[in-house]
Each structure stands twice: as C-alpha cells, then as structure tokens.
Image: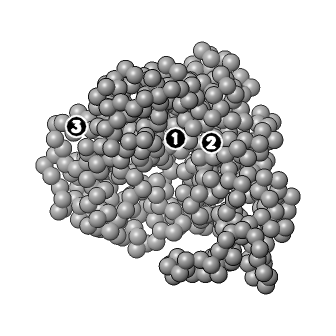
C-alpha cells in the first residue's frame, strides 16, 4: 500500500515555484513577471509562478522516473489500475491512444454508433475499420443508452477477427450498461475491452455509485478527472489492467497525441485530485449523492417535469445502474424544447445546465456544488414551470423528437480513407448520397451524426437542419452554419 497522503508532483511544483533563481527557460512570461496585466488581474500572479516546464526536479511526462512516475503510481492504486498515465490533452487523447495502441490500418474495432468524436479521430489516425453497434433506445424518453451484451456477442460472432471492443460507460445521461457481461464476452475472444469512462471517474469511491469500469473487468479505461472530480479542465487519466494491453504501445501512442510541452498546472491538479479522493472520496461522494437526491426529489414533484430514474433491467437493454449524481430533467410536458428551457434557465434564472437535448436538460452535480446551488436549481425549475409553460409542443416538434433514431447510416469508405481523400465543398442541398469527408455533430455531447466515410442520407440532413433551427449547435465541420458540407470528390 502506498501512502495516499502524498502529493509528490504538487509538492515538487510548489518547491520549484518558490525557489529563487534567474529563469532562462520556457515559458516566456518567466514565473509571471512578463504576464499580461489584465490576465494577472483575473488570475493573480501566484498561478504563473507554478506554470513551469520540465525542469530536472519536475520529471518528464513521456519518460517519467521521478515525481510524475510516483504520482501516476499513486493514482493507479487509488483508481484500481495496474498502470496509469496522466493526460493533459483531455480524454480525447486517451481514447485516440487506446485505439492506436490496439488497432492498425484495416483492423476491425467494435464500438457503439453514439461514440464521442474522439473515437472517430482515433479511427482516422489508426486506419481502423469501425464495426458499429446501435445503442439501445428508449422511444418514450427519446434517449439512446448503452450497447448490450447480446449485441456485442452478435458483432463478435460476425467479426471474430476484431482487435478490440470499445464502449461508453456511463452515457452522457449517467446510464451504465452491463459492462461485466460485455467484458466476459469480449475476453472469450481474447481481445481487450476499451472503455470511454470520461464521466465515471468518481465511481470507484462510493458503494452507492455504479461499479467502476476496471472493477467490472475493463482492460483499459479513460477518465476525465476534470469533468466530475477536482482536476483542472483538460486533465484526465488513462488506466489499464491485465495483460491484453501493451503498456509500451500506450506510451508510444500518447507521444503522438499529447503535447510535448505539458502543463504542470494540469499535471499537479491530477495529483491533488487523486489525493483528495483517496483520502476523502467516500465522504465527498456521500455529500454529493445527498444533494443530488434532494434535487431529484424536489424537481420530480414540480408539475410538468420528470427526472430520469433507473432504466429497466435485463436484456435486451441490459442496464445495471444509473449514476445518481447525473440529473436529467424532461421538460417537454411544459410545451418547451430542452433548448428553449436551457436558454430561459441560463439567461433569466441563473441556472446553467451541462447540455440540452430536444426533450431534456442534463446537469452534473459534483464536488463544487453547494446546497445553495441546489436551491437555485429547484427554484429555477419552479419558476420555469409556472411562468414559461406553454400548452404543448407543436406537432412538428413532436415528429422531430424521434427522428434521430430513424437516421440512415452507411459506411462507404474507412474514416481514414475519406478524411484524406480529395474532397470538395458543396451546398448542403447537393450532398444527398455523397460520401461525407468531415465530422458533423450537435454539441454537446459531441456525438457525431455524420463522420468521414459515411453516405449522406436525406434524413440526416433534415435532422441536422432541424436541430440547428431548434437552438442546437453544430460542431466539427468546416461550416458550422451548415450551409455547406465537405464531401469526397
């Protein structure tokens, strides 16, 4: 057992920031002395004294032998891994590295169609061929959930030469599929299970939370420590266990997708966040779960509102758990879309959601939230229901609510081939049945509706236009106004 009280990287950074010396190394602001005054006024100068580079006492992220290595070993023990890597380019680079380390050009990887755009980037970089599984869908709530063990079994029977399975756990809505069963099926083929656990870094620290991906049998998991724990934005971790993943290949892949000038502020925040959870995780999560329970109970009692509760168990859905720190509120009975409710809450009632969808708003309740936040959230929804309610959603909107589950997807080229193909930019109206050459996704949550290599269906174009018209934001493509699309020539 390691001493989880230690914060070796943070301590080393603190010592170097306080050491009197003449700096002749990057960054150019030299311990904050050359920083812009408006920026110093906002953040204070202390933070810039700690904005240091790879000095001798601070170790090297790509070849750690000192304090970074110690910090990563502490993190591995705290999160239940055999080896952990700190990430400064977010979970995005972790997902990319996971695919690069397990798949080469032409190799098959099984994954859900509602993966994050970082997985599509991993396909482009690696040249891997996606074998997509459609996630299970709740037509009443209009929410896509997880892939099921049966779907994974079927995909592997059809593609026994696949090199890996990748899944999302939990979903953006906090729903957790039957990961243990998926791991058992995947391991029957002696291939690794990779998990995008970006929103589940807290699972290991409280028994009332869903089982962590590693405890469920995953070979590799990527966690956004900044999303739900106390690290700074962009700070994430990649964990592995067992012998199905080559650690050296992970290290080499991360060198391709991480900055060679890593921020020590981000690295130190990972060290500090690990110590905080290792020492106080259960207590902190108990408080958060209590706040979430209070919010869920009170909001569910407001007329016209409902909250996402535990999905039904068993196949075909195969769900096991719901992360109760994730709160999804359905607002469609108020006659509002999620986008409209989000705008009202944010601009008029002082409550900002994590993201909006057509029927819902989703909120992350985490370490920094307070009882006052919950009170403001409940009051915001109370006011929304009383003062902004309409008779109902229009028939047109009701039709569009379910359209995204009837979209047509057909992969014509590998994502890599399409990304590097000779392309042209055409008006949106002229792209039907052409092969897409860019990622197009409503954001958040950053799940692509189109990706390089897919044939563009008319239903997809109509859906994207409707999402935009109803207040959604389209990202990933060159023209976010969606007047044009890049296609293979």
Q: Earlier in the sequence, mark 1 or mark 2?
A: 2
The answer, for residue 213, to whether it is visible in the render is no
At horizontal 70% and vertical 44% (from top left) the residue drawn is 256
Task: Mark 3 or mark 1: name the one nearer the start of the chain.
Answer: 1
**What numbered label is drawn on residue 416?**
none
Which quarter of the picture shows residue 144? top left
Work out which quarter of the rendered image holds the N terminus and state it. Answer: bottom right
**Nearer to me, 220 or 91:** 91
Quickly name the residue at label 2. 95
The reply to whether residue 15 is visible in this rendering is yes
Q: Are marks 3 and 2 in contact (CB under 8 Å)?
A: no
Up the image or down, 365 lies above or below 424; here it is: below
Q: CA distance from mark 1 to mark 2?
A: 9 Å
- Is residue 74 placed above or below 32 in the rendered structure? above
Q: Residue furthest bottom?
A: 20
Q: Secondary structure at mark 2?
A: helix
Label 3, on which residue?
398
Q: Provide residue 116's location: percent of width, then percent of height.
A: 51, 41
* Way the structure is coloured: one colour
Image point (86%, 58%), residue name = 65
Kindly indicate whether the residue at mark 2 contacts the one at mark 1 (C-beta within 8 angstroms).
yes
Q: Secondary structure at mark 3?
A: helix
Does 170 sit above or below residue 18? above
Task: Tally the numbered discs.
Answer: 3
CA separation in Å, label 3 and label 1: 26 Å
Residue at left offset 25%, top offset 43%: 469
242 on left or right of 163:
right
Nearer the observer, 337 or 474: 474
Density class for disc 2 (Cα within 10 Å; few <14, some 14-19, many ≥20) is: many
Mark 3 Cα-neighbour bin, 10 Å: few <14, some 14–19, many ≥20: some
Q: Which residue is mark 1?
A: 116
């Amino acid at each position: 057992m390691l001493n989880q009280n230690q914060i070796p990287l943070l301590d080393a950074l603190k010592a170097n920031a306080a050491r009197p010396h003449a700096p002749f190394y990057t960054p150019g602001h030299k311990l904050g002395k050359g920083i812009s005054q408006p920026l110093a006024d906002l953040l204070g100068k202390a933070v810039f004294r700690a904005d240091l580079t790879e000095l001798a006492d601070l170790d090297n992220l790509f070849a750690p032998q000192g304090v970074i290595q110690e910090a990563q070993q502490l993190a591995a023990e705290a999160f239940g891994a055999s080896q952990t890597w700190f990430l400064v380019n977010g979970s995005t680079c972790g997902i990319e590295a996971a695919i690069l380390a397990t798949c080469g050009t032409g190799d098959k990887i099984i994954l859900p169609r509602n993966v994050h755009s970082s997985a599509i980037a991993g396909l482009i970089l690696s040249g891997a061929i996606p074998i997509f599984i459609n996630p299970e869908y709740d037509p009443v709530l209009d929410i896509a959930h997880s892939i099921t063990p049966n779907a994974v079994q079927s995909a592997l029977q059809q593609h026994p030469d696949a090199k890996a399975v990748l899944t999302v756990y939990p979903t953006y809505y906090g729903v957790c599929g039957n990961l243990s069963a998926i791991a058992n099926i995947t391991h029957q083929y002696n291939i690794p299970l990779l998990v995008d656990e970006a929103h589940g870094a807290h699972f290991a620290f409280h028994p009332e939370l869903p089982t962590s991906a590693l405890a469920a049998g995953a070979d590799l998991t990527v966690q956004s420590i900044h999303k739900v724990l106390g690290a700074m934005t962009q700070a994430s971790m990649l964990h592995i266990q067992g012998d199905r993943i080559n650690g050296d290949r992970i290290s080499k892949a991360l060198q391709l997708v991480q900055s060679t000038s890593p921020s020590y502020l981000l690295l130190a925040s990972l060290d500090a966040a690990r110590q905080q959870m290792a020492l106080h995780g259960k207590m902190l999560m108990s408080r958060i779960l209590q706040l979430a329970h209070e919010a869920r109970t009170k909001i569910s009692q407001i007329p016209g509102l409902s909250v996402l509760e535990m999905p039904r168990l068993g196949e075909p859905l195969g769900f096991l758990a719901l992360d109760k720190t994730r709160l999804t509120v359905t607002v469609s009975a108020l006659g509002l879309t999620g986008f409209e409710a989000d705008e009202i809450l944010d601009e008029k009632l002082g409550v900002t959601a994590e993201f909006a969808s057509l029927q819902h708003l989703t909120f992350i309740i985490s370490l920094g939230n307070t009882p006052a936040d919950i009170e403001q959230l409940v009051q915001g929804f109370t006011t929304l229901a009383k003062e902004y309610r309409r008779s109902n959603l229009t028939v047109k909107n009701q039709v569009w609510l379910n359209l995204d589950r009837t979209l047509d997807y057909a992969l014509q080229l590998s994502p890599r081939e399409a990304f590097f193909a000779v392309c042209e930019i055409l008006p949106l109206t002229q792209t039907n049945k052409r092969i897409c050459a860019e990622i197009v996704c409503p954001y958040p949550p950053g799940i692509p509706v189109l990706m390089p290599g897919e044939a563009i269906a008319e239903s997809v174009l109509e859906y994207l236009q409707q999402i935009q018209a109803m207040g959604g934001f389209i990202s990933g493509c060159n023209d976010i106004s969606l007047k044009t699309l890049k296609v293979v020539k």
